[in-house]
Image (tube, grey):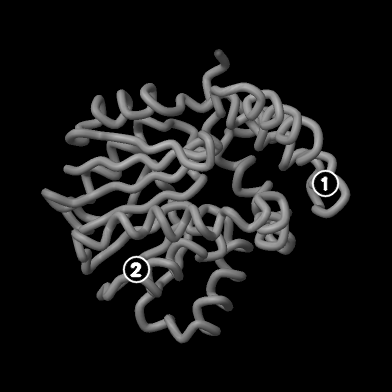
Amino acid sequence: MIDVEKVKPYNENDGKKKQIARMFDQVAGSYDFLNRLLSLGIDVYWRKKAIAKLRNLQPGLVLDVASGTADVALEIFRQLKVERITGIDISEKMLELGRKKVIRAGAEGVIHLQIGDAEDLQFSDNAFDAITVSFGVRNFENVEKGLQEFKRVLKPGGKLIVLEFSRPRVFPLKQLFNIYFRYILPFIGRVTSKDPRAYAYLYESVQAFPDRERFTVLMEKSGFQNPVYEAWTAGIVCCYVGSK
């Protein structure tokens, strides 16, 4: 299997991180619309279910990585009584849209969005009660380095929630999923977005991502305690949970 860290949006010499930032800057305007359309709205349910896993912890300070247009940060704001949510992303265009949504929700006193690198977090050790990442880990240049940074900035007893695409394993969903992600989704992306490569890259990165048991092994290797995962919607996505 191809290493997810070697899968890039463009066939260029630039590093993956720089390419990812450019890709999301280019698709930012259509990102939310396409997310709802291409997932048939199920992505909203996935986020709600993932954030619900933090209710027992009742975190005060939360870091949302790959925050993008702030969908996860806003879901945390709606579900939990938190003191502060810090959202970071490497795409300024995505964050610009996210800030507008935060203001419309009246959440600007709680949600703070800023440019940030998941693999080089500019926060002190033991700074957050919880960290969330939604559909962002497969875009990392170095997945293990990102996980190690998460562990560093989490407080003891803090929780990491990762929501990421997976690959169904049962017939015929496995075959239908591959057809949809490989052919239909990139076609819709080419027609509706400014970057025809973005949705082809989505398929390639999902195929390369070390999902399910392999990702929990990476979490454990990075120091997370008792990492577990749940496969949702017949295995289209997985929610991973680990504690420091």
Residue drawn 51% across the image and 57% down it: 45
Amino acid at pointer 2: Ile
Which residue position is annotated with label 1?
A: 188
Q: Which mark is residue 85?
A: 2
Amino acid at pointer 1: Ile
- Vertical arrangement, residue 146 with respect to residue 176, above or below: below
Q: Nearer the viewer, mark 1 or mark 2?
A: 1
Q: Pick whichever of labels 1 and 2 is earlier in the sequence.
A: 2
The picture places residue 184, in percent across and down from the top left corner, at: 80, 38
The picture places residue 201, in percent across and down from the top left corner, at: 68, 34
Quadrant of the rendering where the N terminus is positioned: top right
- Mark 1–mark 2 distance (CA, rounded to whole Å): 33 Å
Residue drawn 67% across the image and 32% down it: 177
Quadrant of the rendering where the C terminus is positioned: top left
SS for tag 2? strand
Residue drawn 40% across the image and 42% down it: 239
Q: Is residue 215 left or right of residue 70?
A: left
The picture places residue 16, in percent across and down from the top left corner, at: 58, 34
